[in-house]
Image (tube, rainbow, N blue to C red):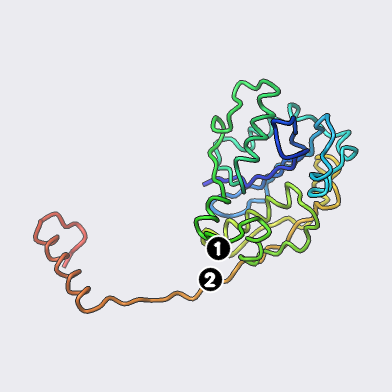
Amino acid sequence: MRQIVLDTETTGLSTAQGHRVIEIGCVELVNRRLTGREFHRFLNPDRDIDEGAEAVHGISRADLETAPRFHEVVDEFLEFVKDAQLVIHNAPFDIGFIEHELKIMEHPQPSIEDHATVLDTLGLARELHPGQRNSLDALCKRYEVDASKRDVHGALIDSELLANVYLAMTGGQSSLLLHEESADVIDRGHGTPPKNSGSPRAVVAPNPDLVVIEASQEEAAAHEAMLEKIRKSGACVWDFD
């Protein structure tokens, strides 16, 4: 099973106001293990960044002057996510922005569903923890995923945090492979990252104590009676006594 944990940063909150994607960060999971493969790009939006958005992610327009435009990296991005399941926190926001970029460049397949499936971890968290705060920060605290190295939001570091939260939230993971050297981002020519691009250390919550509830004598007797009916039916393929 191949999954891509994805996050974006943007110039603002609404595509209807012309806001654009300025960072895409993805990490790859195969069979619930981080492989070390990632896709990370800063993007030149050709517009100003809202003051509120810049306060969240710490990326200024000046940081992006030499970054590529979305249409210059789209083929590489779509190849990376092709046929995978995208794991995204508050997926409608990120998917909406990515599809907006695809429509701006008049891509022949502007719907993400043409390229990958999507799992929204915010919806999953709300099912597991109704009535509680389910932001990424809150989930990191709840599942003891260490986010102490993250001063501001960043697409790559947030995708790594989300990967660990998702694994803990859906059953835990005993061995995680996170990247120690944020300098690799620069070495691979992904642009000049802001100061927040250091990688987190994952701490996985311990397995909870399991409560074992034994069947009563009446339940055991009813179970045995049902098994006897199945044996007499002649359709039993599992009883070799």
> Mark 2 to mark 1: distance in Å?
8 Å
Q: Residue furthest bottom?
A: 217
Element assignment for label 1? loop
Q: Quadrant of the C terminus?
A: bottom left
Q: Position of residue 71 (x, y in %)?
A: 73, 26
Tell me which residue sits at (64%, 40%) in the image: 93
User: Residue shown at 61%/38% (left/top)?
Assistant: 81
The amino acid at mark 2 is Asn
Judge the density around disc 1: few (<14), some (14-19), many (≥20) Cα neighbours within 10 Å.
Answer: some
Side of 228 relative to 171 (left or right)? left
Earlier along the polypeptide chain: callout 2 or callout 1?
A: 1
Residue 214 vertical position relative to residue 114 in the rendered view, above or below: below
Q: Looking at the image, which is closer to me, 81 or 31? A: 81
What residue is rendered at 79% in x and 29% in y? 69
18 and 184: which one is in front? 18
The percent position of residue 151, horizontal first and vertical second, equals 80, 57
| Rendered location of residue 239, percent (x, y) | 19, 63
Q: Are marks 2 and 1 in contact (CB under 8 Å)?
A: yes
Q: Amino acid at mark 1?
A: Gly
Q: Which residue is mark 2?
A: 207
Q: Residues within 10 Å of mark 2 (few under 14, many from 20)?
A: few
Provide residue 91's location: percent of width, then percent of height: 60, 43
Work out whether residue 111 or residue 186 is closer to the camera in this orientation and state it.
111
Q: Quadrant of residue 33?
A: bottom right
Please give the residue where the numbered disc 1 appears in the rendered image: 172
Callout 2 secondary element: loop
- Examine the image and state in which quarter residue 92 appears: top right
Q: Is residue 193 above or below residue 151?
A: above
Does residue 172 lie above or below 3 as drawn? below
Which residue is rendered at x = 88% and y = 34% of the image?
A: 65
